[in-house]
Amino acid sequence: MLVADCEGKRIDAFTAQKGPTYSCPECRGEVVLKKGRKVVHHFAHKPPTTCTWATGETRAHMEAKAIVADALKTRGLRVELEYVVNTLPGDRRADVMAWSPNGQLIAFELQHTPIGIDEIERRASSYASANIAQIWIPFLSPKVWDEGYPHNGGWFVQRYTPRSFERWVHGLNGKNGMWMYDPKEQEFWLGRLASHQQYINETSWFSEGGEENFAGGYYKYSKRFRELTLNGPHKATDLRIAVSTRKAFSTAGYNWPAARIANLTLA
């Protein structure tokens, strides 16, 4: 985790110094500051522990949170890492919380691992009820670069299999598309999903009466695949935030609350 308490004050691992005693904001147990050239600065629980905040977190996820937070701070915004929202279910931390100049809270959720639809809908509804604007940013899989190719200055994957939560995030943002993060290059891409048509080859066979039958020979929309278009890449410092509102909406299997949505725009 990237934050801890020290003498009643919250401090992040990037500004913390070794020496003082640090404790976990959740379980109050002692944590150790980890700093080094090859690791992301962070706090780690002393074993044994059952604290939910001690769950292993990838380096890429911690790096992404730090990159977003640093970019927001350079614009003069108040920013807190792993900010606790008491109304959130389960893990109550927003990856990054920012305050706009007019006081609007904006929660950044950087989704490195898959999240269940029920969980993401509960968290989204909780943010909406608290009038917190939200933006969900999925991580790009390395397969995107293996399966796609350059197109119109960006990147295109003709047969992309979106994860369920990516379909949900894309639906939340509507025509704005969804921002996605490349952990290898530490860059952001604006992604848009579109329907994919696949060709069903024509086949023929003879019935018992000797009549020849035909099937296929047409295109149909795929339920599994989508076409993914990525525009970018962009550094976090090149992006700004725009907040809008959306109405509640539902389809088969997905629900989106009436909410304030944060979207990234080019500076």
Image (spheres, rainbow, N blue to C red):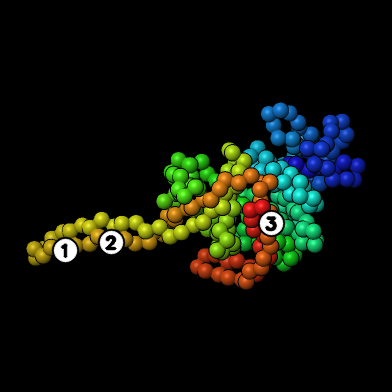
- Image position of 113 (left or right of 32): left
The residue that disc 1 covers is 213
Residue type for callout 1: Asn
Residue type for callout 2: Tyr
Labelled pair 2, 3 in contact (Cβ < 8 Å):
no
Labelled pair 1, 2 in contact (Cβ < 8 Å):
no
Decide which of tag 2 and tag 3 comes sooner along the chain: 2
Quadrant where the N terminus is found in the figure:
top right
Residue type for callout 3: Ile
Q: What number is the disc on residue 241?
A: 3
- Residue neighbourhood size for the residue with mark 2, other residues' Cα within 10 Å, grouped as few (<14), some (14–19), many (≥20): few
Judged by depth in the image, the label closer to the viewer, 1 or 2, is 2
In this orientation, does residue 31 appear? no
The residue that disc 2 covers is 218
* Residue shown at the point (71%, 42%) measured from the top left: 66
**Image location of residue 131, percent across then percent down:** 74, 65
Callout 2 secondary element? strand
* Residue shown at the point (66%, 68%) measured from the top left: 245
Q: How many marks?
A: 3
